[in-house]
Image: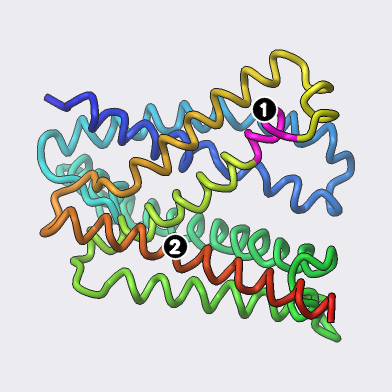
């Protein structure tokens, strides 16, 4: 049987990992016909679809894998292999499924890089970061410096996660580190209607404040549970230290870049 603590650990990861990403509609609002309308519609349409996919997908994995260890990196190929091993065309079906998963991963990565690289660019435009981040490629008009920065940080985290860790642990380290950053951003966003300026708080309806309180609580729980692995690792303490170190170092670098840009503007 699973403990309540473990269940809350899984819940926090699903709530942030599965239901995050809607903000990319806002990031790409300039390429949307009616962003104010479409952002709300995208959430209403996507939320039940995402929930259904996770419920059905998790049920399928548990039905075929059972009490055996689940492959965190490739649960879908693992389930396909176990569920279709008795069919003559199992290999072809599994290959098509894995190919579709690969296409999804490439598409998802493209969206993440697009959104993540635009955020430093906009911050550079608003003079919150050095102008270096807002530099556009002369031909393609893409934020080339922001893309390089995001790519370099991603590469460093990916390589660092594999130091002294197995494959499953390294994958969970990267995933949990992403959840920390997502949780911090989401908590800040949800805190605005609760702790923001008086004009913002007074204009927020009661239903928005209740939703913000729930979102802030879930975001805080997601941040807290990232230091606890959901699989057996050689050293849970080492796992927690790595997550805390990545979070602290990344935010320290962000603060340093912000202060550097602020100092240059004053100078």
Q: Looking at the picture, tell me which residue is in the foreground, 1 or 74.
A: 1
> What residue is drawn where x is 10% and y is 41%?
68
Check disc 1 and report its element: helix, strand or loop. Answer: helix
**Which quadrant of the rendered structure holds the N terminus?**
top left
Q: Residues within 10 Å of mark 2 (few under 14, many from 20)?
A: few
**Which quadrant of the rendered structure holds the C terminus?**
bottom right
Q: Is residue 64 magenta?
A: no
> What residue is drawn where x is 67% and y is 67%?
117
* Rendered image quadrant of residue 159: bottom left
Which residue is outermost to the top?
206
Which residue is outermost to the right?
33
Identify the magenta region: 189-196
Residue 74 placed where, x, y %? 29, 54
Query: Which of the two labelled residues, at mark 1 and mark 2, occupies the earlier sequence position?
Result: 1
Checking the image for residue 248, the label placed there is: 2
Q: CA distance from mark 1 to mark 2?
A: 25 Å
- In the image, is 147 to the left or to the right of 141? left
Residue that mark 1 sits on: 194
Q: Is 161 drawn above or below residue 26 in the view shown?
A: below
Q: Is 28 drawn above or below residue 8 in the view shown?
A: below
> What residue is drawn where x is 84% and y is 63%?
126
Q: Residues within 10 Å of mark 1 (few under 14, many from 20)?
A: some
């Amino acid at each position: 049987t699973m403990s309540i603590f473990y269940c809350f650990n899984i819940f926090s990861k699903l709530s942030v990992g599965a239901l995050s990403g809607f903000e990319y509609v806002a990031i790409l609002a300039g390429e949307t016909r009616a962003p104010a309308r479409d952002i709300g519609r995208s959430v209403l349409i996507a939320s039940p679809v995402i929930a259904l996919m996770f419920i059905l997908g998790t049920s399928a994995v548990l039905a075929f894998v059972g009490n055996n260890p689940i492959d965190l990196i490739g649960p879908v190929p693992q389930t396909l292999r176990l569920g279709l091993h008795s069919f003559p065309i199992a290999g072809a079906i599994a290959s098509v499924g894995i190919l579709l998963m690969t296409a999804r991963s490439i598409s998802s990565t493209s969206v993440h890089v697009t959104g993540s690289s635009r955020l430093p660019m906009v911050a550079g435009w608003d003079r919150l970061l050095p102008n270096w981040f807002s530099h556009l490629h002369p031909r393609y008009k893409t934020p080339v410096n922001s893309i390089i920065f995001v790519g370099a940080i991603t590469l460093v985290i990916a390589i660092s996660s594999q130091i002294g860790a197995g494959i499953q642990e390294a994958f969970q380290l990267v995933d949990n580190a992403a959840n920390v950053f997502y949780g911090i951003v989401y908590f800040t966003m949800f805190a605005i209607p609760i702790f923001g300026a008086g004009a913002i708080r007074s204009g927020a309806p009661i239903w928005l404040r209740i939703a913000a309180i729930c979102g802030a609580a879930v975001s805080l729980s997601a941040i807290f549970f990232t230091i606890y692995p959901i699989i057996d690792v050689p050293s849970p303490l080492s796992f927690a230290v790595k997550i805390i170190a990545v979070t602290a170092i990344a935010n320290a670098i962000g603060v340093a870049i912000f202060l550097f840009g602020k100092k240059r503007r004053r100078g």
